Amino acid sequence: MSVATVGPETATLPVIDFVSPIPGFPDDRRFVLVRLDEVGVLYALTSVDSTGLRFLVVPPAQFFPDYEAEVDDDTLAALGVTDQSDLLVLLVVTAGDGAQDATVNLMAPIVLDQRSRRAVQLVLSRSGLPVRQKLLVA
């Protein structure tokens, strides 16, 4: 498993390798996951290859307890996964003017195999799930 030093906030963290690039970012396949809060709700998926490129991500359980990303067999094979319990699902956050305006992409979660540190952004195109779902409900 490779490690990277991206900046002082990342120290030396295990590198996550995307088996295919995140749409729109073809040159970025290596990232580290940086916890941004004490309780482990907000993370930054930070590129090792492009300075300043990072995505805010959250685990869905706290915000959407019934959310389940149906991972197809092709994706499991691409990740080399035999046990789905090793998968970590993260939702990409789009920040707004304030916390109440933040949205998450339920249609395209990041799926990470915690053992191999291989990941993919899974597009659930037939799910009917929204690309911009309010993160916080008033």
Image (spheres, grey):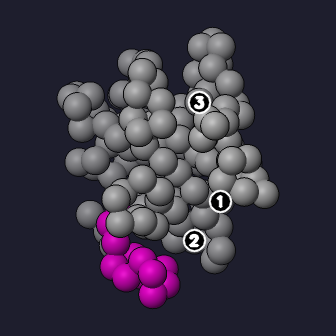
The disc at residue 49 is 2
**Residue drawn at point x = 41 percent, y = 39 percent:** 62
Residue 136 in view here: yes
Q: Is residue 81 above or below residue 101?
A: above
Q: Residues within 10 Å of mark 3 (few under 14, many from 20)?
A: many
Q: Is residue 114 above or below residue 105?
A: below
The disc at residue 106 is 3
Per the image, is 126 magenta?
no
Decide which of 107, 97 is in the foreground and name it.
Answer: 97
> Residue 127 at what x, y percent from top left?
60, 14
> Residue 17 at what x, y percent from top left?
43, 55
Residue 61 appears left or right of 20: left
Q: Secondary structure at mark 1?
A: loop
Per the image, is 5 magenta?
yes
In terms of sequence position, does the residue under pointer 2 or pointer 1 come before the other?
Answer: 1
Q: Which residues are magenta?
A: 4-15
